[in-house]
Image (spheres, rainbow, N blue to C red):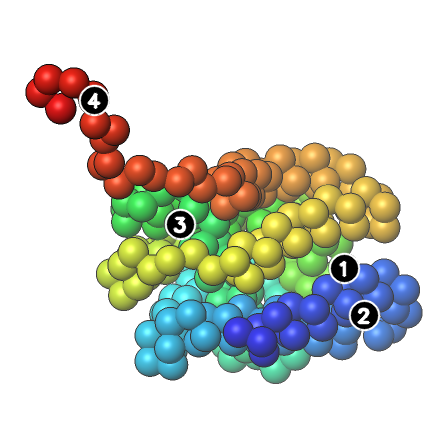
């Protein structure tokens, strides 16, 4: 638990410094931030679920996500036609190895957010897929703008097509369908919820104050907030003490 919190603190610090990093060093800094976020998320998952279950959960997210990227680059499905540059490091069949991290590092935060909204497994899987897709409404525009990948045909939302987000929801739904079986009713993690909430707030502030993308701040912030705000409200709601069925006795006859 301490390791996850320390890594989350390091991630926050790195992201606060990132806007001041020279442009030439930003790709390396981006890879470092991805590594920190992945480490924080997986460390929390291990602390909450134990090594075996955490490996199954993280492995399924990475494997399904990376397989979908391989299919996407090769066939254009399910995201639409796109291509990666070399900024994210070594590639396999045109897909950076680091792409698997994007699906893994936000899987547990999305799953935890959904777990605060519902206890039903199928509904939780759908909500988690939505929460993950909402984050991509912030991620994709910036990464496209900075040249990490491109959409040759463009798109109506910051040069990203709607097919991309439909693909994210479909792939996310597949990942969390597996999680619903493997993790069942696993309790949400406060650290994972904090990571999702920090990412939500950070994306809004960064797009307004640093990247000059008010549309992304509005659309992505509203989408992530639709999941984060009610989840945080439920998490922070005071717990009312229960009387455990104790009923005061009446005085007099029949008492």
Which dot marks residue 115?
3
What's the distance in space between the residues labelled 1 and 3, CA to CA? Answer: 34 Å
Residue of label 4: 250
Residue 123: x and y, percent?
32, 43
Q: Are marks 2 and 1 in contact (CB under 8 Å)?
A: yes
Which comes before the other along the chain, label 1 or label 3? Answer: 3
Return the residue at label 2. Answer: 26
Q: Tell me the mark number nearer the camera, choosing from 2 and 1.
A: 2
Answer with mark 2 or mark 4, whichever residue precedes in sequence. 2
Q: Quadrant of the C terminus?
A: top left
How far is disc 3 from disc 2 in space, using C-alphas?
A: 35 Å
Measured in 3D between alpha carbons, the distance from the residue under mark 3 to the one under mark 4, in whole angstroms, is: 42 Å
Q: Earlier in the sequence, mark 3 or mark 4?
A: 3
Q: Name the residue beneath numbered marker 1.
A: 146
Q: Quadrant of residue 34?
A: bottom right
Marks 1 and 4 in Cβ contact (< 8 Å): no
Give the alpha-carbon distance from disc 2 to disc 1, as whole Å.
Answer: 9 Å
Quarter of the image for residue 223 reads top right
Alpha carbon separation for disc pair 1 and 4: 73 Å
């Amino acid at each position: 638990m301490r390791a996850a919190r320390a890594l989350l603190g390091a991630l926050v610090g790195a992201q606060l410094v990132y806007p001041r990093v020279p442009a030439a060093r930003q790709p390396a800094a981006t890879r470092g931030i991805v590594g920190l976020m992945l480490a924080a998320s997986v460390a929390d998952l291990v602390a909450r679920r134990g090594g075996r279950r955490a490996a199954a959960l993280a492995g399924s997210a990475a494997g399904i996500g990376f397989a979908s990227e391989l299919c996407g680059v090769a066939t254009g499905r399910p995201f639409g036609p796109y291509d990666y540059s070399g900024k994210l490091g070594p590639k396999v069949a045109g897909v950076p190895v680091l792409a698997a991290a994007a699906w893994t590092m936000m899987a547990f935060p999305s799953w935890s957010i959904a777990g605060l909204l519902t206890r039903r497994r199928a509904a939780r899987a759908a909500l988690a897929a939505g929460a993950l897709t909402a984050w991509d409404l912030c991620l994709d525009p910036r990464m496209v703008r900075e040249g990490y990948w491109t959409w040759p045909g463009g798109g109506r939302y910051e040069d990203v097509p709607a097919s991309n987000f439909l693909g994210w929801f479909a792939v996310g739904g597949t990942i969390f369908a597996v999680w619903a079986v493997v993790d069942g009713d696993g309790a949400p993690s406060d650290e994972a919820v904090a990571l999702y909430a920090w990412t939500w707030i950070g994306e809004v502030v960064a797009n307004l104050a640093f990247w000059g993308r008010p549309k992304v701040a509005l659309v992505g912030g509203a989408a992530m907030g639709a999941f984060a705000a009610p989840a945080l409200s439920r998490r922070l709601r005071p717990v009312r003490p229960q009387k455990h069925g104790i009923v005061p006795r009446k005085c007099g006859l029949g008492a």
